[in-house]
């Protein structure tokens, strides 16, 4: 298999649509981070641009696999990966300006206790501590180094870190007002004002690793090409980057947590359908049992299939488990390292597109 790591840095404020209507008076706003389908769709379009996009070529393009998209931040001339903040962490301000980051862990139910969670799963809680203040909002992107530390921490003890050590804030936004010009009078058309709100990447880029057959011949990568709505331009290039490897301690771990680092598209909505029988797709010999889960509010996904014309290209809205969701599992058999940066989505095309990629950590009962 051919493997390439691509970095894409929008030159203009990038817009990745949220699915809401874009008409006069209604602005087009970008979601905080692009969906995997938006990025791999742009990549496949650029790779296949010298073809006629016939049916057979489209099938081949859809087989290109993506690991990403992830945020790559440039520090001291080098790019380092950052992942979405996990849902099993709660932060409080400390006296020295740092943050006390507390883990959430499943708590066993005793006789007479129960929950209204799906399947009666146990609650995911923080250790009982005396705190009057409310949790603070954490940075949405965690640096790979800190993410690896967090995945290795199994217990319920807080870790103190500065916000800069943890990660990066959300991408800044730029608002623009556009007007439609009448071609005849060269004046603004009445009522034709449009607003857009895009993401500014500055010293950050979108990082995706793609894989396809060595016998596949695609177009050379362009240095400047569009991505996202409005066909706004971005710089594209290939660059080696350090990808975190599966830690050795994971091999013998029996209680593991699966942290989604891209949104998960699952047959059962908030959880993978394969968890009913316990074997992830394509990983025969590995069996997991779901114990508990921390899944925030669903993320909506819609859009257009540009290989179809007119109304036939409309994609039905899907609701995804957002990136950062955490599933607490027990390993019944097999080596959980095989799950590292692998998709656990139920459908094969979703796995190729990069939905449901996970990192693995350890945990213990609260």
Image (spheres, rainbow, N blue to C red):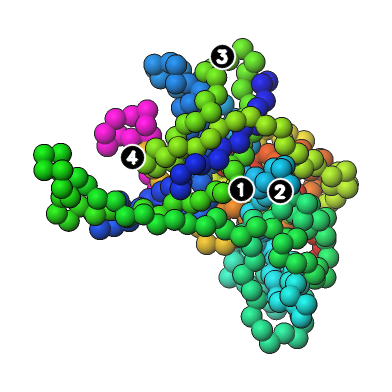
**Disc 2 target residue:** 75
The answer to which of marks 4 and 1 sits earlier in the sequence is 1
**Marks 4/1: CA distance?**
34 Å
Foreground mark, 3 or 1?
1
Q: Is 310 covered by the magenta stretch?
A: yes
Query: Pointer 4 and pointer 1: residues touching (CB < 8 Å)?
Result: no
Q: Residue at x 75, y 72 (%)?
A: 98
Q: Is residue 3 left or right of residue 185?
A: right
The answer to which of marks 4 and 2 sits earlier in the sequence is 2
Foreground mark, 4 or 2?
2
On screen, 313 above or below 92? Answer: above
Foreground mark, 4 or 3?
3
Foreground mark, 4 or 1?
1
Q: Which of these two is toward me, 329 or 39?
A: 39
Q: Residue at x 61, y 22 (%)?
A: 212
On screen, 342 above or below 200? Answer: above
Helix, strand or loop under label 2: strand
**Disc 3 target residue:** 217
Query: Pointer 3 and pointer 1: residues touching (CB < 8 Å)?
Result: no
How far from the left and from the top, in percent, is residue 283? 72, 35
The label number, if any, that marks residue 203 in the structure image: 1
**Marks 2/1: CA distance?**
8 Å
How far from the left and from the top, in percent, is residue 342? 68, 39
Query: Pointer 2 and pointer 1: residues touching (CB < 8 Å)?
Result: yes
**Marks 3/2: CA distance?**
34 Å
Say whether residue 216 is visible: yes
Which region of the structure is painted magenta?
A: 305-320
**Marks 4/3: CA distance?**
30 Å
The answer to which of marks 3 and 2 sits earlier in the sequence is 2
């Amino acid at each position: 298999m051919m493997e390439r790591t691509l970095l894409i840095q929008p030159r203009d404020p990038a817009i990745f649509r949220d699915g809401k209507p874009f008409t006069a008076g209604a602005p087009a706003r970008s979601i905080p981070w692009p969906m995997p389908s938006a990025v791999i769709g742009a990549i496949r379009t650029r790779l296949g641009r010298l073809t006629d996009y016939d049916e057979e070529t489209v099938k081949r393009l859809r087989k290109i696999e993506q690991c990403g998209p992830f945020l790559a931040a440039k520090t001291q001339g080098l790019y380092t990966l950052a992942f979405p903040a996990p849902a099993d962490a709660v932060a409080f301000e400390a006296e020295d300006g740092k943050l006390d980051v507390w883990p959430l862990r499943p708590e066993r139910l005793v006789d007479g206790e129960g929950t209204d969670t799906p399947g009666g799963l146990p609650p995911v809680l923080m250790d009982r501590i005396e705190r009057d203040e409310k949790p603070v909002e954490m940075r949405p992107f965690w640096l790979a180094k800190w993410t690896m530390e967090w995945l290795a921490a199994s217990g319920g003890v807080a870790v103190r870190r500065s916000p800069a050590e943890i990660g990066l804030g959300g991408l800044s936004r730029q608002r623009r007002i556009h007007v439609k010009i009448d071609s005849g009078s060269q004046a603004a058309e009445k009522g034709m004002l449009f607003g857009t709100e895009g993401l500014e990447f500055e010293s950050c880029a979108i990082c995706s690793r793609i894989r396809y057959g060595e016998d596949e011949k695609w177009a050379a990568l362009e240095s400047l090409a569009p991505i996202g709505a409005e066909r706004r331009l971005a710089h594209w290039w290939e660059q080696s980057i350090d990808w975190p490897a599966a830690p050795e301690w994971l091999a013998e771990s029996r209680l593991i947590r699966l942290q989604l680092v891209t949104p998960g598209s699952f047959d059962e909505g908030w959880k993978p359908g394969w968890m009913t029988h316990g074997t992830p797709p394509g990983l025969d010999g590995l069996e997991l049992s779901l114990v508990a889960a921390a899944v925030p509010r669903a993320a909506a996904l819609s859009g257009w299939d540009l290989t179809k014309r007119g109304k036939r290209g409309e994609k039905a809205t899907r609701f995804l488990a957002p990136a950062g969701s955490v599933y607490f599992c027990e390993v019944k058999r097999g080596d959980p390292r095989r799950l590292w940066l692998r998709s656990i989505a139920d459908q094969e095309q979703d796995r190729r597109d990069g939905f449901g990629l996970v990192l693995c950590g350890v945990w213990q009962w609260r």
